[in-house]
Image (cartoon, rainbow, N blue to C red):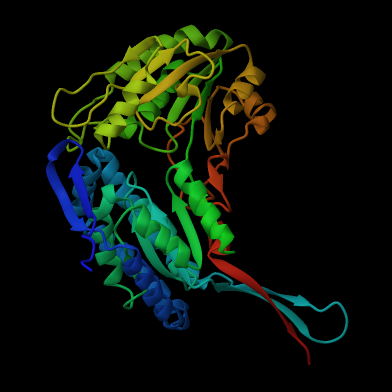
Amino acid sequence: MTAAPATPLLSVNPADPSDVVTEIAAPGAPAAAEAVERARAAQPGWVRAGAAARSAAIGAVASAVESAAVELAALAVRETGKPLAEARAEVARTAAIWRYYAQAPYEAAGTVHETAAGPGLLLTRRRPHGVAGLITPWNFPFAIPSWKAAPALAVGNTVVLKPAPEATACARRLAELVQAAVPDGVFTVVPGGATEGAAVVSAADVVSFTGSTAAGDAVARAATARGVPVQAETGGLNAAIVLPDADIGRAAAHIAAAIAGYAGQKCTATSRVITVGTALDPLREALAEALRALPVGDPADPATVCGPLISDRARDRFGRALTGVPVLAAGSAVDGPGWYAAPTVAEKVPDGHPLLTEEVFAPVAALLPADDLQHAVRIGNAVPYGLVTSVHTAGLEAVLQGLDDLDTGMIRVNAPSTGADFHVPFGGTKASGHGPREQGRAVLDFYTSSRTYTLAP
């Protein structure tokens, strides 16, 4: 019997779809399972090498990323359409992530306790699970794989990374840098789509996923059915709440950037703008002006804020999301070969409209009025997601008294909803996430299991 041909894997430049960045054959499920087994064979040697060896290797990755920064930023621009300024920032952040986790091998791996009665000791000790299967999206092609892989490696796991097809070239280049610093089998990239991803999830000892809610739910179910630890960071439908005492011009600039930056293709992008009381009219005008002023165009231009969407399908979804709603303001649209969309704010959006129920993942948001802060909080919570809320105010009263009722994993005051600090926990509630938080020192617990030892005399 003739074997079925391998599925082609194609990645193109969103600003010029005729520019093919990479085209390879997807390896298939057996190859993905084999990669996990090779990683499993390499794991005992990696953990036994000791903290100094792991720390040095992770630090070497940070240095390699820094040395290749110009090349990596250009690759992210070309393959994912990320504006150059953001691509440069992501690469710098990627190096910082590896540098941060280079110290993690020296973290305390447990605690010592007295026994309840009599001589002896009780010890707790964290140990790696084995092989970490990582499923990552295209929108942060270097940072997200790094903030998953670096802590997993630091505590002694080996890693198999399955990146999104749209970021295949970025993932393979990152793998070259990591593989130069670690022993064979410790870090492997398996390109491909859902088939390869499912194979990794079905074989790995711990799973971390970032992507769509539907795919994340499937990953969480599959891993949970196997009794495997899993975390899934999924969608967002994030709100910006603007109070009457806010600096309206500053708030409008922050919100416009959070709507349109990277064409809204961030899980932390602002999708709903909730204005409280008298803030509506001034914010309405200031936001429209700020949105129109944002540079839209070639992502390779350092001045560009909003580049193309990742695909023609994404642009079609953006168009459908605006069906049946009045547009308050729209920024410029690029007439060219890329998948560009004009940053847009809609108003008078009826209940149940897709803009209020679904993550569009495009540069679009709905403007919504609220009577007071409590009303704004209810509107903010009235969606399936709970990732991040930004709040714009001149005082602390709202922060101290009203925001604990927000059902989101993160709250950012007088700052855009976008952005994350890699040294603190990241994640959301409801349909925005499953399992423990990512990033910071908290994730070290996720990538390990705790064992209790009783030492009797």
Q: Residue at x 56, y 64 (%)?
A: 226
Q: Residue 80, percent across and down?
A: 25, 43
Q: Is residue 373 above or below residue 176?
A: above
Q: What x and y, as percent, mark residue 266?
A: 39, 38
Residue 191's x, y, as percent?
Answer: 29, 59
Q: Is residue 297 above or below residue 323?
A: below
Farthest residue, direction left: 18
The answer to whether one can see residue 438 in this image is no
80 or 57, nearer to the observer:
80
* Residue at the image position 35 percent from the left and 29 percent from the top: 362
| Quadrant containing the C terminus in the rendered view | bottom right
Name the residue: 54% across, 35% down.
385
Q: Is residue 265 left or right of residue 276?
A: left
With respect to residue 303, does 197 lie above or below? below
The residue that appears at 36% across and 56% down in the rendered structure is 195
Residue 327, above or below 319? above
- Residue 26 x, y percent position in the rendering: 25, 59
Q: Residue furthest bottom?
A: 457
Q: Could you tell whether 107 is left or right of 354 in the image?
A: right
Residue placed most toward the observer, 253 or 194: 194
Quarter of the image for the N terminus: give it.
Answer: bottom left
Q: How many marks?
A: 0
Residue furthest front in the image: 1
Q: Quadrant of residue 116?
A: bottom right
Q: Residue 133: in sight, yes or no? A: yes
